């Protein structure tokens, strides 16, 4: 009998119990009786009108699906004539060329092998089993398990057993699945005889019915899974160079989870969503491929910390705080730090608006210790936490040491949590040693390894993961650029090594409440934009080669500075009124004030690059000193006066309270050095007197801010000693002008 002369069966026909008697006899050679429990049958509303409930009407073969709908396993809906709705929406040709493929049956079981099938109600209402030893070629009556009711045009692939393969085709198998996966499947089948019997039952279906279930290459929609879905594996991007070639990896055979195993190495590819602007990704672009490295592969890697040492460190931290204190510390973190440094996914820690204990215990040791240490300075703002920790020894040093210890161990298997811990450690106050730029380089390397520097907008990852990846990259970029500026070291990030788009409001999580700052998300986005301008200032004036080009060429320096100055002015004019009025931050404490201080320091850095040829006596600078050179000094003096007014505003109560980025302390020192430079290079007595007055006001405001607040002492202490100490300028006395 020609299998293609039989009636065409849709997936819903079998799973809804809608086979007509003719279809049953055609689809079940040998007289297999197939019955579904009442709960698994389709509701009467999905059936054709008739005198009462009953099976669905017989469908003629002329209504068989088109080739594209058959491949996608969806209902082929044709209003009058082709094309169908799916082909029309995808702008594809609606064809009926391909025939249903014959199913390749596995070798039959031996005559003496028992066959057992059972089905039980999910509510425990009863069960039936059929056991026996059938003869060669006989059929067994099998009751399938209860199945959830599905609509006729539903995709049933998600309701099948996870290991179910409805149609075994050797050619299809060779196109999709690697050899290592096949070996794993063989072992699973040997260990799961019941699953094999269930599979054998489906293999007895009609060839045409089984063809509806085949899974085409790259067309099966799968749920978006996070890269961190494997608890014992870490994902690392396969780069363009190296021992693994991404152009070759895209030719390997991946399973339905977009994973494959090659020589005991697991890979995960990331699909790209169709472009919303009708510009699809070029076919020659390799898909992002990650290596899923098992944590066990780095057991002998060095440097490492023994497991018992890490276990003891985690136990010691658990003894520092009670559960309530832990929750309150995290509450302070999300109130003061997270709005200005949104590097965590709050959804992973909060359940119904409350911090989850299970999620907190699941955090890596490095991140747990870093979170507690970062939140400790804000304990005075918690009425219950402050008195309970007032007389206890300061645990911050122990927490930071534990975080560094665990971070070194976790670098062998990096995850986003590893980078989050590194960023928090970089915001440790008063940490200005050569270790800091080394840790920045580590954070940048982690970001590249996690592929955070790549634009992941079109990647098939969950939306919260995409937003977190974008925020993490911008946090790394901000930290790298401001560390390079404040320490005078080269930046670790080159412009050509990243293509992440700017932040949008949708990339930032909403505020938790009115106390955490309604403008904080805007603050982080503005800081990212400002950091981009800072990066261009550093590249234009302060790299090794840029210094050689501009140090003695005032004309070139001035030409480069025009565009940068215009961008800074545009950034300032675009500040929201909720944050700033006339350039002064409305909420002077914390991140808002730090953002405006960063803007002032960016301007000062630009003026330092512009005034450098005037200092070195460049040929162009001497000739233009009375024109453009004078305009540059006038702009620098105006910037210095704006900084003095800003610091005087911070001298009030609460002016320096709240969260400040770790580079803010150095920014105050940079401003002090800038005022000193203007004072010492004053060209006239009037200019010297003006700068002397500004320096005196600056030092008074810095002293008031340092003495009035504990946090201010750490922030402004460095600025009090830089620029004035060894120059005979104590108290602002003495002019520095030259005749």
Image: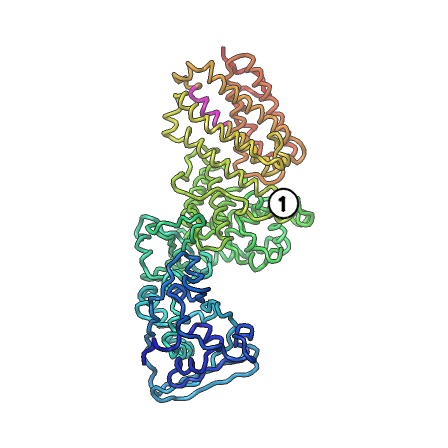
| Rendered location of residue 351, percent (x, y) | 60, 58
Residue drawn 50% across the image and 74% down it: 147
Examine the image and state in which quarter residue 176 appears: bottom left
In the picture as drawn, the residue positioned furthest to the top comes out as 739
Above or below, 308 against 729 in this view is below
| Rendered location of residue 663, percent (x, y) | 52, 36
Examine the image and state in which quarter residue 552 appears: top left
Q: How is the image coloured?
A: rainbow
Asked if the stretch drawn in magenta spans residue 678, the answer is no
Above or below, 42 against 594 in this view is below
Taking the image as drawn, is residue 253 in sight? yes
**Secondary structure at numbered mark 1:** helix
Residue drawn 49% across the image and 70% down it: 152
Majority SS type along the magenta span? helix
Q: Is residue 725 left or right of residue 388?
A: left
| Rendered location of residue 259, percent (x, y) | 38, 61
Image quarter (top left, top right, bottom left or bottom right) of the N terminus: bottom left
Q: Which portion, as a residue range, is magenta?
A: 604-613
Q: Which residue is mark 1?
A: 516
| Rendered location of residue 485, percent (x, y) | 47, 33
Q: Nearer the viewer, residue 141 or 540?
A: 141
Taking the image as drawn, is residue 718 in sight? no
Q: Nearer the viewer, residue 423 or 202?
A: 202
Q: Nearer the viewer, residue 664 or 181?
A: 181
User: Count of labels shown?
Assistant: 1
């Amino acid at each position: 009998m020609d299998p293609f002369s039989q009636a065409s069966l849709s997936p819903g026909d079998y799973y809804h119990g809608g086979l007509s008697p003719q279809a049953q006899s055609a689809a079940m050679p040998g007289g297999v009786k197939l019955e579904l429990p009442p709960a698994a049958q389709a509701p009467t509303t999905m059936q054709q009108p008739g005198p009462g409930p009953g099976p669905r009407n017989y469908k003629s073969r002329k209504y068989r699906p088109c080739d594209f709908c058959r491949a996608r396993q969806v209902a082929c809906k044709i209003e009058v004539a082709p094309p169908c709705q799916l082909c029309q929406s995808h702008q594809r040709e609606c064809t009926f060329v391909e025939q249903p493929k014959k199913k390749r049956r596995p070798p039959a079981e031996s005559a003496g092998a028992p066959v057992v099938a059972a089905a039980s109600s999910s509510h425990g209402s009863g069960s039936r089993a059929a056991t026996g030893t059938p003869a060669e070629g006989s059929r067994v009556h099998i009751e399938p398990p209860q199945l959830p009711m599905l609509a006729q045009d539903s995709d049933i692939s998600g309701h099948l057993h996870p290991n179910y393969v409805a149609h075994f085709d050797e050619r299809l198998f060779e196109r999709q699945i690697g050899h290592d996966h096949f070996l794993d499947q063989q072992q699973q089948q040997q260990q799961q005889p019941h699953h094999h019997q269930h599979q054998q039952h489906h293999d007895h279906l009609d060839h045409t019915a089984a063809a509806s279930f085949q899974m085409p290459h790259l067309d099966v929609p799968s749920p978006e899974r996070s890269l961190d879905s494997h608890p014992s594996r870490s994902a690392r991007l396969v780069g363009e160079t190296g021992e693994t070639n991404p152009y070759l990896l895209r030719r390997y055979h991946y399973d339905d989870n977009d994973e494959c195993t090659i020589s005991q190495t697991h890979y995960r590819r990331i699909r790209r969503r169709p472009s919303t602007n009708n510009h699809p990704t070029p076919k020659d672009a390799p898909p992002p491929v990650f290596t899923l490295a098992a944590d066990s592969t780095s057991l002998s890697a060095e440097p490492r910390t023994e497991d018992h040492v890490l276990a003891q460190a985690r136990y010691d931290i658990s003894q520092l705080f009670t559960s309530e204190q832990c929750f309150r510390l995290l509450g302070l973190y999300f109130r003061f730090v997270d709005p200005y440094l949104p590097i965590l996914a709050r959804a992973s820690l909060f359940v119904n608006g409350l911090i989850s204990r299970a999620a907190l215990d699941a955090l890596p040791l490095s991140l747990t210790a870093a979170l507690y240490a970062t939140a400790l300075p804000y304990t005075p703002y918690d009425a219950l936490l402050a008195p309970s920790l007032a007389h206890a020894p300061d645990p911050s040093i122990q927490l930071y040491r534990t975080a560094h210890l665990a971070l070194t161990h976790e670098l062998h298997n990096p995850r986003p949590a590893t980078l989050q811990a590194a960023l928090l450690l970089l915001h440790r106050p008063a940490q200005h040693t050569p270790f800091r730029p080394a840790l920045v380089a580590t954070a940048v390397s982690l970001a590249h390894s996690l592929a955070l520097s790549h634009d992941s907008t079109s990647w098939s990852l969950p939306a919260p993961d995409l937003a977190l990846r974008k925020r993490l990259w911008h946090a790394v970029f901000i930290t790298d650029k401001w560390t390079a500026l404040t320490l005078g070291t080269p930046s670790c990030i080159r412009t050509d090594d990243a293509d992440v788009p700017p932040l949008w409001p949708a990339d930032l999580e909403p505020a938790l409440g009115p106390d955490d700052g309604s403008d904080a998300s805007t603050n982080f986005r503005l800081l990212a934009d400002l950091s981009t301008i800072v990066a261009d200032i550093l590249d234009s004036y302060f790299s090794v080669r840029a210094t050689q080009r501009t140090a003695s060429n005032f004309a070139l320096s001035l030409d480069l500075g025009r565009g940068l100055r215009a961008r800074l002015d545009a950034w300032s004019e675009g500040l929201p009124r909720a944050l700033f009025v006339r350039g002064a931050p409305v909420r002077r404490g914390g991140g808002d004030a730090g953002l405006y201080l960063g803007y002032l320091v960016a301007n000062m850095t630009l003026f330092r690059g512009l005034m450098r040829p005037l200092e070195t006596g460049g040929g162009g600078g001497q000739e233009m000193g009375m024109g453009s050179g004078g305009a540059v000094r006038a702009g620098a003096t105006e910037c210095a006066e704006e900084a003095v007014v800003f610091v005087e505003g911070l001298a009030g109560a609460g002016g320096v309270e709240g969260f400040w980025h770790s580079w803010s302390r150095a920014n105050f020192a940079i401003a002090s050095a800038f005022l000193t430079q203007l004072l010492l290079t004053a060209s006239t007595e009037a200019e010297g007197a003006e700068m002397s007055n500004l320096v005196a006001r600056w030092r008074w405001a810095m002293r008031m801010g340092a003495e009035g607040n504990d946090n201010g002492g750490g922030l402004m202490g460095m600025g009090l000693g830089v620029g004035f100490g060894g120059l005979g300028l104590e108290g602002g006395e003495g002019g520095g002008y030259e005749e």
